[in-house]
Image (cartoon, helix red, strand yellow):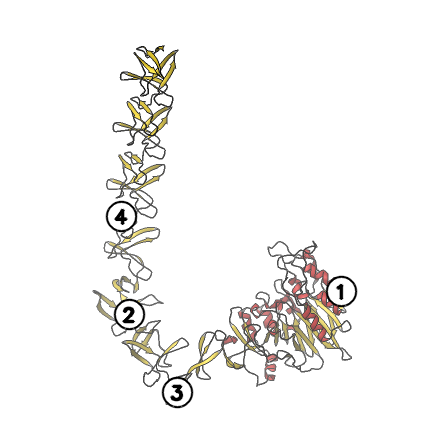
Amino acid sequence: MHGKKMARARLRTAGKLAAACLAVCVVGAVQGNGNAVYAQGSGTAKIHFLTFEGNTEGVLLESRDANGNPVFGMVDSGEDWDYPDGSDQRYPLRSGIVTNEGYDQEVRDYLTKMGVNKDNFQFYIATHPHSDHIGTADLVIREFQPQNLYIMPYDDSMINTSPTDVHLWDNQYVYDQTLAAAAEVGTNVIQDINDQNSAFSFGNFQIQIVNYDPSYQGQITYDANWFCLGVIAQANGNTAFLTSDMCDDDGDLTRVMQSYPQISDLEVLEANHHGFFDSMTDAFVETASPEVMILPGAFSNLKTSRVNLIGSLDTRLFALPAYTEQDAIVVELGADPVTTSADGSFRIYTDADKHLRAYQDGRWCQGLFEQNGVQYYAKENGILAVNEEIYDEETNRVYHADQNGHVTMIGGWVTENGQKYYVDQNNNYRKGWLDISGNRYYLDPNTGALQTGWVVENGQWYLMSEEDGRMLKGWQKNGIDWYYLDENTGVMQANRWLRDPNSGVVYWLRGWGGRAYSLTTQIDGYSVQFDGEGRVVGPTWIRYNGMWGYLSGGQLATGWIKDGIDWYYFNEDGSMKTNELCMIDGNLYYFRGWGGMLYNTWYQNPADGNWYYLRGWGAALNTGWSHIGNDWYYFNPDCTMKKDELCRIGNDLYYFRGWGGMLYNAWHQDPSNGNWYYFRGWGGALNTGWSHIGNDWYYFNPDCTMKSDEFCWLDGNLYYFRGWGGRMHSGWYHDKNTGKWYLFDKEGRAYRNQKVRNGIDTYYFNDDGTMYSGWKEEGGKTYYYRGWGGMAYSLTMTIDGVPCTFNFKGELVRRG
């Protein structure tokens, strides 16, 4: 601890509570004193940190002039409700601009309450053009008219626009409004901040503005935080550092620490950039080592390790959003240690890891404490016990903490006549099993006395610690023997193999529980030898967890093992695969009921009926053709054999019979749609064309289906394929659907546009192949084809009521 800290610690009142708390999370029930009287030093020097709900900040400095009159200065003043609407192209309404938060009225009311006016308002320092810092600057300047405005030059062109998250927001709008307000009321504007004007006296304060290097103005910068001003305020031998949004991304914090030794071992530090994770650095916090840290933002902005560091420095920490019932936390730089209006307050914060942390007087609470009639228990670093049981050594009792951290006593240990007992919250002595804070104990069922050593209940053995009586688990040495107690139940394991969860070594636990060592014995029909540590000597089979395992080097084998002429495979837990189809390294294998890998044979899965063929080296055939025995088979990518299936492979169609063999030199009718296919000698189905099979001609479509019961135009000729597929030839065909007749020649072609003599009669066929009937003019001669098709010849017949005579050639020779 720093020397100054030790001196401060001696001044702290012994009567202060070591810890206490609640206000659920950042705002809850508060015990702060809004009307605190502050200890006076040699001159008034107060810093008012305005308590806003969000991540925004405003600081009012108060002192006295030579005549004892109050004087004020301000460093930033917080977010406002004003923002650009986009109507002016200079001020776009960009994503990220704050539109739902502002503290205009709160700032106005507080400055009015404090009596700030143009006669006593000496300066306003605008640290950088972000609205969460100087959004209300124009309001403050117009209404309270500070004599001087310190603000560095800014233009949007200074900000890098290449990243996707451009940090322009409404910077230009806020900056321009601030300068416009100063011009309206005649405030002196100081933009060339330098070594001569950066330090000045203010009442009892000595003010030093830092980080005013103007070189940023000729550069492109990621964020205005990188040229943010800071303010060192000293009074009455105390130092405060108001950091605003200073960061160390470009080394600002490091340079300031090196240039201004007065910020080492501070009294007051305003956490830079609202305490956000990556903006503060541990080196900065350790160098500053403040007595008081004011956090202008949510407690959860601080990463957990930094919260712990701050606590280890004995720094008092106050997060402003938790104190909004006060207008401000006022820090008085007039005493050692410094005083604040939040002194003695109690808060419960939620940290970045969602833990509840209890703070009393800005320091984390420890142990069991009471606040407003509610008990809490703070563990390490002020973290409240939540949803758990805790044993408190000081009270010798056990407590239960609920989700809000409220604790109630549920019991505790007492010692009587040298024997320990457990008394519950109703002062009853517990008996039998007792679970406390993750440990289990056994209390004599008659007397309630805590038991140690071996305990047996319901035939199960347990080992209780000789030191504190808690139930032991895992490996335990008792006497000269080792025992294993179940990691969950604590039950002693016996008459079984046990695989050590850490080393993987397998041990045999004898019937009475002790680990076998330095002996040879029969287990499951195998002679097993153990060395002095209990390891099995040499390879052997064992029954492990109801399955077979194989020990080698004292550990269960995993992966492939060859024993005799057979191969076996063992899972990660050492169990042997049996009666199982499984994929190993991209190949499918089957292990028989007794474990041996199946090879050079077929296997049908009883679960789904699929067939597989296991090759000589065990892996199932997959994705392709295979000639097995006298037949060809095809296997899918999942190694299943195709069966009872029409499938296209490459450009050809094949059929695999119910037992899997490829069909060839044979017909197949698809039962689902009745289509017929013919498979050639090499297996592929005929397609797109004529084929002479047996004594008949057939025609196959591009999809390999056989044409049947249909007329078909092929190469300019009309054909008819009968119901069973064969081409119609040398005869008549009557289409029952249309009633039309067709006559086919010996090649199967329908006669068309011609006379055809068939038998003793002559017929005429139309262009579409249908038989003609009626009058026909041909070559200057007239013919008549009767209703049944035959041409009239060598006769006289009445047609349409008129006698007509035809010669032997069928020519009409007389009508009427």
* Looking at the image, residue 150 lies above or below residue 660: below
In what element is the residue under mark 1? helix
Q: At label 4, which amino acid type do we have?
A: Gly
In what element is the residue under mark 2? loop
Task: Assess whether mark 2 and mark 4 are in contact (beta carbons under 8 angstroms).
Answer: no
Q: At label 1, which amino acid type do we have?
A: Ala
Distance from disc 3 to disc 4, alpha carbons, whole Å, reads 74 Å
Q: Residue 327, percent across and down? A: 65, 74
Give the mark nearer the N terminus: 4 vs 2. Answer: 2
User: What crowding class fits label 1: few (fewer than 14 Cα within 10 Å), some (14-19), or many (20 or more)?
Assistant: many
Distance from disc 1 to disc 4, alpha carbons, whole Å, reads 94 Å
Tell us which disc is closer to us: 1 or 4: 1
User: Could you say which is closer to the camera, residue 248 or residue 53?
Assistant: 53
Distance from disc 4 to disc 2, alpha carbons, whole Å, reads 40 Å
Please indicate whether residue 115 sits to the left or right of residue 620 in the image.
right
The residue to which callout 4 is attached is: 616
Quadrant hosting residue 358: bottom right
User: What crowding class fits label 2: few (fewer than 14 Cα within 10 Å), some (14-19), or many (20 or more)?
Assistant: many
The residue to which callout 3 is attached is: 415
Kindly identify which numbered label has been placed on residue 561: none
